[in-house]
Amino acid sequence: MNPNIKYVVIMPIILVFTSLAIALDISVCGSLFAQSCQKSEVYKQMAALIATALALFIIGTVFAFISIFKGKSWICISEFIIVAAGATLMLIALCIYYQGKHFWAPLVGGIAMTLGLETSVFILIDILS
């Protein structure tokens, strides 16, 4: 069994939770991309960070699938960097949010961030071993 299969399993879960963080209501203004939320500079920053993290997680998912078929070390290293960057952006978005109110979207974003960081650590361990 390919040791990289665990990343193919976890990456779609990270994508789902990151997508939920974007789709769920952040406050009374609605979801992050609602026009009413985009009037707030804080929510604009969060939307940009989480959307960028989602894009990075999508790229990381593609790299996870590629790594099953091609066991090149550069693929694993790229996947690690991409997932770690996405997780870092999620963490920054949560830090921006928690300066104010608390709702479900940041919690779900925190789950995606945690899974992203965990996955990047697993990838790093595989690279070093």
Image: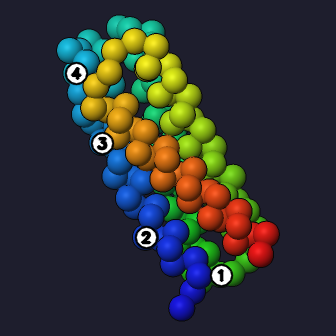
Give the amino acid type for the residue marked by disc 2 in the picture.
Val
Q: Mark 4 — residue?
A: 30
Task: Tell me the amino acid under the disc marked 4.
Answer: Gly
Residue at which label 3 appears? 20
**Residue 88, quarter of picture:** top right
> Rounded to the nearest whole Å, what is the CA distance between mark 3 and mark 1?
31 Å
**First of labels 3, 4 by sequence position:** 3
Decide which of tag 1 and tag 2 comes sooner along the chain: 2
Q: Percent x, y for residue 7? A: 52, 69
Question: Left of 81 or right of it: where is 15?
Answer: left
Looking at the rendered structure, the secondary structure element under dot 3 is helix
Residue 91 lies, in percent from the top left, at 54, 34
Residue contact at pointers 3 and 1, CB within 8 angstroms: no
Q: Which residue does the image show at 40% across and 61% down from the upper left?
A: 12
| Residue furthest right as drawn | 128
> In this rendering, would 34 be left or right of 88?
left
Q: Amino acid at mark 3?
A: Leu
User: Which badge, 3 or 1, comes first in the chain's sequence?
Assistant: 3
**Can you say whether 34 is above or below 72 in the image?**
above
Question: Secondary structure under badge 1?
Answer: loop
What residue lies at 75% left-to-right and 69% top-to-bottom? 127
Of the two numbered discs 2 and 4 in the rendering, the one whose residue sits closer to the viewer: 2
Residue pointed to by mark 1: 70
N-terminal of the two: label 1 or label 4?
A: 4
- The dot on residue 13 is none
Q: Residues within 10 Å of mark 1 (few under 14, many from 20)?
A: few
